Amino acid sequence: MRDVLTFSCQGDQLLGIVEHPADGSPSTGVAVVIVVGGPQYRVGSHRQFVLMSRSLARHGYPCLRFDYRGMGDSDGDPRTFEDVSADVAAAVEAMSVRFPAHEIVLLGLCDGASAIALYAGQTKRTLAGAILLNPWVRSEESIARTYAQHYYRSRLASPDFWSKLLRGRIGVIRSAREFIANRKTARQERSPETNSFQAAMLRGLESQQWPILCVLSGSDLTAREFEDHIAGDIRWTARLSAAGCARVTVEGADHTLSESGHLDACMNGILDWLRGLRHSEAVRPREQAAPCP
């Protein structure tokens, strides 16, 4: 069951699709709003957000996937993930009106996850939680560091790399120059100016007590970049270790979980975490949900 939901954001009309649980399904007390990674519209790569929202609805979680202003079927001028907090706020309000007996969980992929963290620093609304899937924390230094630590190491361990090298299909000098340049950039100190949005993400998440689920793809450089960014950072570690927080790694998955088995594994992790919210202080559903099969 699905229908169209239109709502206003600073004078522009936004459009989304709501997936509903089947009639008679017991209420979980939680509704999900998907914040897409950009530049994308509400369907997502290989219909990812369609599949995710329908899976959530089948398990009793109403779900909204919507277009930012300037994207898809929504009005307004295009904007980056750093400037969509008002759009996220409007979507949360619209779902709260549509499902007044439910608490809201936000789910975002890539810079959609980053947009959720930035929104956290600009809202006073209490939400049931946030699901951050392969969050985007890109900077020149961090991507160089990630390539140096993960990409080149995996290439050197690959028989296919050496086969292409011996056949002359890989430019040795060019590859060596790229590796040296990335190593040099990776060793540079992090600049507060370069990392301003990353710092704002952390401040936003610290300003809220939302439970957080981090879902990371096992074969994704963006996920490795996020892991490297938070590694050894006391504040990030404390925030992602707070009550109700968890981390799931989908081994072998790419950035958008394009293989159905990887998407299924991701959804299993998300659904397990959502069920756990029923027993936390974050969510007090109006009626107890029946156990999910």
Image (spheres, rainbow, N blue to C red):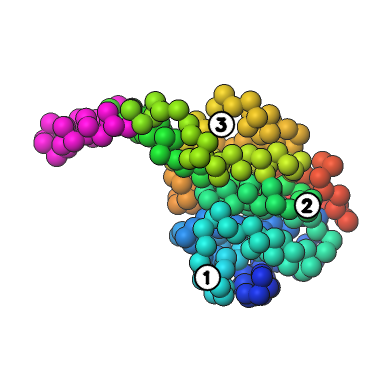
Label located before the other in sequence (1 or 2): 1
Quick check: 49 left or right of 245? left
Q: Mark 1 points at which residue?
A: 77
**Residue 208 seen anywhere in this rendered image of the structure:** yes
Quadrant in which residue 8 is drawn: bottom right
Can you give x and y, in whole percent of width and height, for residue 145 in the image?
40, 31
* Number of residues whose C-alpha sits closer than 10 Å to that of mark 1, classed few (under 14), some (14–19) or many (20 or more): few
Residue beneath the point at 70% across and 52% down: 122
Cα separation between marks 1 and 3: 33 Å
- Give, as a single range, the part of the protein colored magenta: 157-182
- Marking on residue 230: 3
**Quadrant showing the N terminus:** bottom right
Q: What residue type is labelled 2?
A: Lys
Cα separation between marks 2 and 3: 25 Å
* Number of residues whose C-alpha sits closer than 10 Å to that of mark 3, classed few (under 14), some (14–19) or many (20 or more): some
- Marking on residue 124: 2
Residue beneath the point at 66% across and 75% down: 11
Q: What residue type is labelled 3?
A: Ile
